[in-house]
Amino acid sequence: MTRGVRGMTQSGNPNGQIRGTASRREREKAQRRDDILRAARDVFFQHGFHTATVDDVAVAAEVSKGTVYLYFDTKETILAHLLLEGLDMLIADLEAAYAADRRFGAKTRLRRMADAYLHFYQQNPEYYRMLMAFDRSQLQASIDPGIYQEVYARSLHGIEWLERAVKQAQEENLIVVENTREAASVLWAGLNGVLVLLSHPLRAEILAADLESLYGTMTEVLIGGLGK
Amino acid sequence: MTRGVRGMTQSGNPNGQIRGTASRREREKAQRRDDILRAARDVFFQHGFHTATVDDVAVAAEVSKGTVYLYFDTKETILAHLLLEGLDMLIADLEAAYAADRRFGAKTRLRRMADAYLHFYQQNPEYYRMLMAFDRSQLQASIDPGIYQEVYARSLHGIEWLERAVKQAQEENLIVVENTREAASVLWAGLNGVLVLLSHPLRAEILAADLESLYGTMTEVLIGGLGK
Amino acid sequence: MTRGVRGMTQSGNPNGQIRGTASRREREKAQRRDDILRAARDVFFQHGFHTATVDDVAVAAEVSKGTVYLYFDTKETILAHLLLEGLDMLIADLEAAYAADRRFGAKTRLRRMADAYLHFYQQNPEYYRMLMAFDRSQLQASIDPGIYQEVYARSLHGIEWLERAVKQAQEENLIVVENTREAASVLWAGLNGVLVLLSHPLRAEILAADLESLYGTMTEVLIGGLGK
Amino acid sequence: MTRGVRGMTQSGNPNGQIRGTASRREREKAQRRDDILRAARDVFFQHGFHTATVDDVAVAAEVSKGTVYLYFDTKETILAHLLLEGLDMLIADLEAAYAADRRFGAKTRLRRMADAYLHFYQQNPEYYRMLMAFDRSQLQASIDPGIYQEVYARSLHGIEWLERAVKQAQEENLIVVENTREAASVLWAGLNGVLVLLSHPLRAEILAADLESLYGTMTEVLIGGLGK
DNA sequence: CATGAATGAGGATTCATTCAT
DNA sequence: AATGAATGAATCCTCATTCAT
């Protein structure tokens, strides 16, 4: 039952002879797993999580249905791992945008991170939609609690990078807020709000707005508005 | 095809006795319909639209499954009518907040409308969630095109009220924007962004923010940020 | 349960006063009944008995579904009455073709009857199909035994007219058979065989034959073949 | 979509052990499929296609309902495959009766084929009934077009064997007809007409005729009647 | 490990029939 | 007599999951 998350077997296999074989096997296993995840991403995105069937995933991954269940305990577990993947990518993007190893002003950092979020959305609309649309209760009910914790933890991670930039802005006296987490939340809410509206076909039609323009305006409004 | 409230007692019925019967029947029918809608709202909210079954709805409404289908053609049609209800309530709230018949400054109007949206969310979290979460394509595929058009038309209505206030702000020289629809979109996106994040249990947990405080901050940031 | 067949109330109502009213009512009732039967014929023919719904019949007859059940106990009972109607028409046609009151040779009579059968098929394809396709066991199971007996009795009637002509042919020494019922059966089987094949779309396509030509050939073959 | 026997063990499999397993699996699959078809034949015959449920078939075949759908896409598809089976049997019988590899006179051939048809009916009354009673439009609407084409093609095949014998009769100057297809149609119509009447319980009762006697008479009448 | 056949619990929807008014 | 709302059993079909090989 706790199968899915066991991750890549910790390396450090002491047996040289077997290592060759074992690691090949492991590579193959990891590859399979990845194939399935990749297929699931496409299938879930195209048909929607509920409409998509595990069979669809298996066919797309070119494995048997049984094999899917060899790597993932439930359909929801697959989704959870996709969420984890998406979060990882997003966090990596945000981290890179923050660029701790370089000297950037807070405003630059905030703009870079806002841009990174937009790019993540544009590059990975499937992941973005999954991250926004997944049903917490259903997920929590059908996956290993450990994985759910992971989703939670990584979600937290994202907001923390943003908060870091807000803190810097505070230190640079660009903005004055009592609660940096709240300020970061406002930023996220605003930017995400644009993406949420435009990622929904009906609402996008109603607004008839250009994503990049709207997002840019929002970015400036938020940075400007939070500023003193 | 089955419409339920079709009809309206043939007007000009000369027979008081019969009219009474007919109108009572109609009242009862409308009542039934409402019972089902009410039940569906609760059931869909509790179990989620996909997980909920028409049987659940029937049981909650204390009618037979067949009766549900007497009033609504498909499960999705029920959802569509709930969406229409929700939109009607929201639009009424926005209209009341705009208060065309009173002399309000643009800023006041914008704040009143922002408040109205928040209150709508707080009073009708189920409707809000439904409105945000429904799947356009699935809905469009299984309901009468006319009803879908209604959903679309009313969604448009909401943003238009907001735009009206933005135009007034423009006239009052409070803000200077090229595109009032875009400005209204930014407002909606920002406010809605807060609600979206906090209406999702996992994200609400992560942010650990107070809804009213966050929403209030967002309101001021947006109004301030859009202002010249 | 034995409602449907009670037929037209035997006339001879002794009460003159009431007779006017009652007979109008009766006429109206008969009319209603006929409307329903007419509607059912069309609907059953268009959709097929199984696919057609009682609702379809009610709508076509412009009465409520309840009214349909006021006149007929079950859906199958409606079918049975249509069968009776069809048989009545067919028998009347055969009787007219036989023309007992006129002096026809046996061969002429046989040809006239064969023609009559073809015309019946061409004029009333719905009735013909119903008569050929109804499922005995299902019918017997869901209708009043009396009505079933009627269907049986009238079916018998049809073959008897044919047999009468065969007997005449026997008397005229045109044919020599041991069993006139069997000879009549051969006639019916042959003629009906043509109609059966051509009334089925797929088989009609395969044969690509002209109905009248095929039927004519069959008539001559049978009359010729039976003749000594 | 689900085909079942798709595949055929990849040829050239070098591993005897595995080949054994694979082919056993395939034999088992074919067996299952056959079990279901056999069960369906019985169930459809006993209850009638419309009244019979897929559940009935599953129970009779001693498999689960899901398994039935693993082998056949729809209820109608099952019927279509039964039709194909029936047609195959019938055509094989006709072909054998024609006996192309032997020297038979045309009359003998025609009689042999007539006998074969009768025997087919007697040996496989269920198949015969299915072949005569299936509803073209409903079938066409719910099965794979390819299968429908097959049904059509094989139906054509049957009449062609008959036509071949008619052509021979033409060549032998036994009969003189303009259109051999029409002559074959008359033969089929006549013989089939007997079977149609006697395969229907109510009509069989009415005729009270002995099948073999009636059929024999018909055969002679047709062969005699078509002859010059 | 991998396979894919088998399962069977639902789920949405239909429709003949009933019955209160 | 007529209505038409209500019923609920029945039906086809789906699909996540298991398991023997």
Image (tube, coloured by chain):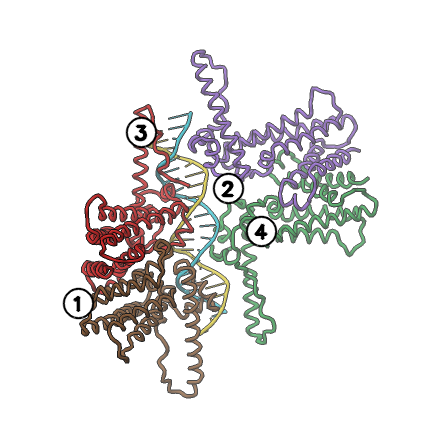
Chain colours: A brown, B red, C purple, D green, E yellow, F cyan
Label 2 neighbourhood size at 10 Å, few (<14), some (14-19), many (20+)?
few
Q: Which residue is mark 3?
A: B21
Badge 3 element: helix
- Circle nearer the viewer, 4 or 3: 3
Left or right of B199 on screen, residue D203 = right
- x and y percentages locating residue B221 in the rendered image: 22, 61
Q: Residue furthest right?
A: D173
Q: CA distance from mark 4 to mark 2?
A: 19 Å
Residue type, label 4: Ala
Residue B47 visible, this orientation: no
Is disc 4 in the same subunit as disc 2?
A: no
Is disc 4 in the same subunit as disc 1?
A: no
- x and y percentages locating residue B52 in the rendered image: 34, 52
Q: Which residue is mark 4?
A: D80
Badge 2 element: loop
Q: Which mark is residue A177?
A: 1
Residue type, label 3: Thr
Q: CA distance from mark 2 to mark 1?
A: 70 Å
Question: Marks 2 and 3: in contact by CB < 8 Å?
Answer: no
- x and y percentages locating residue C102 in the rendered image: 71, 20
